[in-house]
């Protein structure tokens, strides 16, 4: 979109009076920034020669000439923390445990321990660690664990290798100018790279240059826009022989540049603290989320369909939308209220004329199984008659300028002040307003504009850089707090939901965030444009977010800012049905986007995919539980299980949903066929049970009604068909495979059940073993449906059971045996 169009769109969205005020706001900001300039660049400094090396219990401490120090600490055999100073150490907001110890896997009986109750003791992995430190010829120092080898040369060069000496990464000595750090490394060729949070780049981030500064792209973005709302200084590089995840615990503005074999990162300030984690993607993510926390189990309804739109204005309109879904037989789990429900955009208020009975509305919707979600922006309107503003002033809750005055900026309500979420008392104060919405029956909260975003006529659309923040008492400036703002707003919201509604699971949606966000909130991909390239881009965005520890995300179906035609909307809807967050949303002023707005056949296709999502909820829910244990994202790149396969590194027109499903959305208008890369193994066509095997690429014919979906042979796919819990058994072609099923009430902190299936095919016999663990009751009966196996007889724990076609109905069993049609 060109600048003029963007400006006009901005004026349309924010209104002319606000647009004129933005010029004043930007002028004031520029004057302030001139009075408080950033540190001048200064000369380049590098660590001089190594002066001393001192062993530590799990690492070593090195001093260099020129005032550079390096501390190396092993947290586990494959997790090392490195800290180059000078520079202020981070306040550990991203870490699950403030002391940096590793979080244990959440105990299954309480899948959602509040973050502050996690075990803080030293991690058992660290206690087991034996480290060998030795000095080699030439003064090189080597630290080796069972999982990796780090060698420090006397000039500050660091080599990371596998225990057998396979190089993973060579870091050059870091350098400094004034307060900023420059850190570069080379890695073997070929390599691919993933992560960095929310990106619009292709899946493989090599080559490319990326800025890490949470940014509202201004109402619309497409492929190539950089940066977006949610940046995370984490990347995973992969070579055929091994992988390495690097997480920089430094929230200052950063830039990352990658060539095919080199990377460099620049941070504006702070200590250069980072973690090196080795292993395959699943291991690396498990380790990273042991450090930064795992996503708690969401309430099950959040995995269903959400309907939203900026522009729903009244209670009556919301009731009409709910009725529209009901009358057309369209399953619906949530409706979102965008900023128009508020009174003059004052957060925590409700417009008394347009929403006179929010408690009744939410109760009526709840009776239909629909949960109400309301938006909250961080900006608090400056209005002496508004109690959130006056109480915040009294509590010193807002970010200040160096003069001590609250920092001001323009957002929807006009001039606003901004809670300082780096201040513990402010996080608590803010959370004490949530009951205003919770008591009205609101089930979930949606945080928007928390980059934080502000209207500006030019420059960064955010607060002035000299804005001060508390940093839990340590003090700091906006340059360090900016990228943490959305994360800490989410923390305040999460803690409020735990405090005020302890028997229910928090559900928060956020636009912005940083490392560790997964402990508190889901995200969505913001204001993407309504185009075919944006539809395709969304896959890579979701995959790289998942690689950055954020498993729950999804796009606005149809794109936010434009007007998709029926075909684009249909294809977007079909893809989103397999994304963790499944929501229809659009900008104010765009044409209607409810599933019925396009007439037929769109309505029927949407209904089919809404019903399919319902059927798949037990599987989605199982994946959600697995994420609480391992941090693995729900949506994964095709190379997840075979990361050394370079052929799959660049595939971003399809994705895996858990281990079992491969989804290949249609990304071109009027396409009649598309090709699909097949990961190793055999796959069933979900729609007709035909088998595909051992071809690197297959061609699939397309219709408008469906998108290709494949099921891995050997899977037991738990679904719910109407009232019956159904286990779809996709027979392995040979050998055996394992699957899981997790079940509980879908809300609260009651009993849970973890089931494990093993399916084995031997000659003409197919065996399904079922091991169950936990207190949540098993269903009285299940339906078992076979795919890829023509059975003539079946036995449950030795007793014959009747087959009806490819299905049987049975009590839960320990072993099910089928004999093939001979
Ligand atoms: O400046 O609340 O990304 O989902 O509809 C726009 C209005 C503010 C941006 C969000 C979008 C939401 C919109 N918001």
Image (cartoon, rainbow, N blue to C red):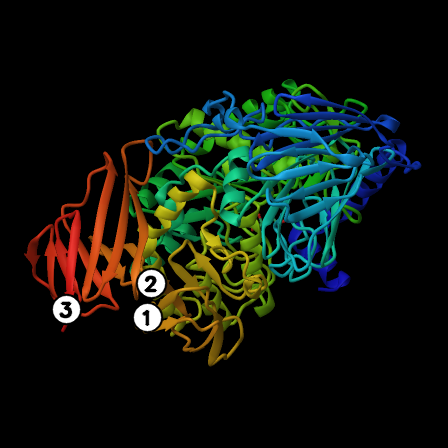
- Label whose residue precedes the other's in the sequence (2 or 1): 1
Residue 524 in view, yes or no: yes
- Label whose residue precedes the other's in the sequence (3 or 2): 2
Residue 619 picture location, percent across and down: 34, 52
Residue 564 picture location, percent across and down: 54, 68
Is the Cβ of the residue at disc 3 closer than 8 Å to that at disc 2? Answer: no
State left or right for residue 795 relative to residue 550: left
Secondary structure of the residue carrying tag 2 is loop
Residue 438 picture location, percent across and down: 42, 32
Q: Which quarter of the image is occupied by the N terminus?
A: bottom right
Give the spatial CA distance, label 3 vs label 2: 20 Å
State left or right for residue 465 relative to residue 309: right
- Label whose residue precedes the other's in the sequence (1 or 3): 1
Residue ID at (42%, 39%): 629
Is the Cβ of the residue at disc 2 closer than 8 Å to that at disc 1? Answer: no
Residue ID at (69%, 47%): 169
Q: Is mark 1 within 8 Å of ligand 1?
A: no
Residue 723 picture location, percent across and down: 20, 53
Relative vertical location of residue 693 with respect to residue 8 in this rendering, above or below: below
The residue that mark 2 highlights is 713
The residue that mark 1 highlights is 687
The residue that mark 3 highlights is 805
Q: Return the mark for residue 241.
A: none
Q: Which quarter of the image is occupied by the C terminus?
A: bottom left
Where residue 193 sits, quadrant-wise, is bottom right
């Amino acid at each position: 979109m060109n600048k003029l169009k963007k400006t006009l769109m901005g004026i349309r969205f924010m209104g002319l009076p606000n647009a004129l005020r933005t010029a004043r706001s930007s002028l004031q900001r520029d004057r302030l920034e001139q009075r408080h300039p950033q540190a001048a660049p200064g000369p380049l400094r590098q660590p001089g020669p190594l002066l001393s090396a001192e062993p530590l219990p799990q690492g070593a401490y090195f001093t260099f000439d020129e005032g550079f120090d390096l501390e190396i600490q092993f947290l586990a055999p494959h997790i090392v923390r490195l800290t180059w100073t000078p520079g202020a150490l981070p306040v550990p907001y991203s870490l699950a445990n403030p002391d940096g110890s590793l979080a244990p896997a959440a105990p299954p009986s309480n899948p959602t321990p509040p973050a502050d109750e996690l075990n803080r003791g030293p991690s058992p992995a660290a206690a087991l660690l034996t480290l060998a430190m030795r000095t080699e010829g030439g003064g090189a120092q080597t630290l080796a664990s069972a999982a990796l080898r780090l060698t420090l040369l006397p000039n500050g060069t660091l080599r990371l290798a596998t225990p057998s000496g396979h190089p993973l990464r060579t870091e050059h000595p870091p350098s400094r100018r004034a307060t900023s750090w420059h850190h570069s490394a080379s890695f073997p060729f070929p390599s691919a790279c993933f992560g960095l949070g929310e990106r619009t780049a292709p899946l493989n981030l090599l080559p490319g240059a990326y800025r890490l500064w949470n940014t509202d792209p201004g109402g619309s973005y497409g492929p190539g826009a950089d940066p977006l709302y949610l940046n995370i200084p984490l990347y995973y590089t992969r070579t055929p022989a091994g992988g390495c995840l690097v997480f920089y615990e430094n929230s200052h503005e950063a830039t990352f540049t990658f060539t095919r074999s080199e990377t460099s990162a620049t941070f504006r300030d702070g200590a250069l603290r980072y973690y090196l984690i080795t292993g395959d993607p699943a291991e690396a993510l498990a380790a990273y989320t042991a450090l930064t926390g795992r996503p708690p189990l969401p309430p099950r309804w959040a995995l269903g369909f959400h309907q939203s739109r900026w522009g729903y204005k009244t209670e009556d309109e919301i009731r009409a939308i709910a009725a529209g879904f009901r009358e057309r037989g369209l399953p619906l789990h949530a409706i979102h209220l965008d900023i128009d429900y508020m009174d003059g955009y004052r957060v925590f208020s409700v417009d008394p004329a347009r929403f006179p009975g929010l408690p009744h509305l939410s109760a009526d919707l709840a009776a239909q199984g629909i949960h109400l979600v309301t938006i909250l922006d961080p900006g608090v309107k400056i209005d002496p008659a508004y109690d959130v503003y006056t109480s915040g002033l009294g509590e010193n809750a807002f970010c200040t300028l160096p003069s001590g005055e609250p920092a001001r900026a323009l957002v929807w309500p006009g001039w606003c002040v901004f809670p300082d979420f780096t201040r513990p008392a402010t996080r608590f104060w803010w959370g004490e307003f949530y009951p205003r919405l919770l008591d009205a029956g609101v089930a979930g909260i949606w945080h928007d504009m928390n980059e934080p975003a502000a209207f500006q006529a030019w420059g960064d659309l955010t607060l002035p850089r000299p804005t001060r923040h508390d940093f839990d008492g340590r003090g700091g400036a906006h340059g360090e707090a900016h990228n943490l703002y959305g994360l800490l707003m989410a923390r305040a919201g999460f803690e409020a939901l735990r405090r005020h509604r302890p028997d229910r699971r928090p559900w928060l949606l956020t636009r912005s965030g940083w490392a560790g966000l997964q402990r508190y909130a889901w995200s969505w991909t913001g204001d993407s444009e309504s185009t075919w390239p944006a539809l395709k881009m969304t896959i890579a965005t979701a995959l790289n977010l998942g690689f950055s520890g954020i498993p729950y995300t999804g796009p606005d179906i149809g794109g936010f800012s434009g007007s998709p035609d029926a075909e684009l909307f249909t294809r977007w809807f079909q893809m989103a049905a397999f994304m963790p967050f499944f929501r229809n949303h659009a900008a104010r002023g765009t044409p209607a986007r409810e599933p019925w707005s396009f007439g037929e056949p769109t309505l029927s296709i949407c209904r089919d995919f809404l019903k399919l999502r319902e059927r798949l909820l037990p599987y989605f829910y199982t994946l959600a539980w697995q994420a609480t244990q391992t941090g693995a994202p729900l949506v994964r790149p095709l190379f997840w299980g075979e990361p050394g396969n370079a052929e799959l590194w660049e595939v971003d027109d399809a994705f895996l949903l858990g281990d079992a499903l491969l989804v290949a959305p249609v990304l071109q208008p009027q396409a009649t066929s598309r090709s699909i890369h097949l990961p190793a193994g055999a796959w069933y066509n979900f729609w007709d049970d035909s088998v595909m095997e051992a071809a690197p690429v297959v061609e699939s014919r397309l219709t408008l009604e469906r998108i290709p979906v494949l099921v891995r042979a050997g899977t037991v796919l738990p679904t719910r068909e109407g009232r019956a819990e159904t286990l779809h058994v996709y027979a392995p072609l040979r050998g055996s495979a394992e699957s899981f099923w997790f079940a509980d009430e879908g809300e609260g902190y009651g009993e849970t059940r973890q089931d494990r299936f093993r399916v084995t095919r031997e000659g003409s016999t197919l065996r399904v073993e079922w091991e169950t663990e936990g207190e949540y009751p098993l269903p009285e009966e299940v339906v078992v449906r076979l795919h890829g196996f023509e059975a003539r007889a079946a036995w449950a724990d030795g007793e014959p059971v009747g087959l009806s076609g490819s299905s049987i109905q049975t009590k839960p069993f320990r072993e099910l045996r089928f004999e093939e049609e001979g």
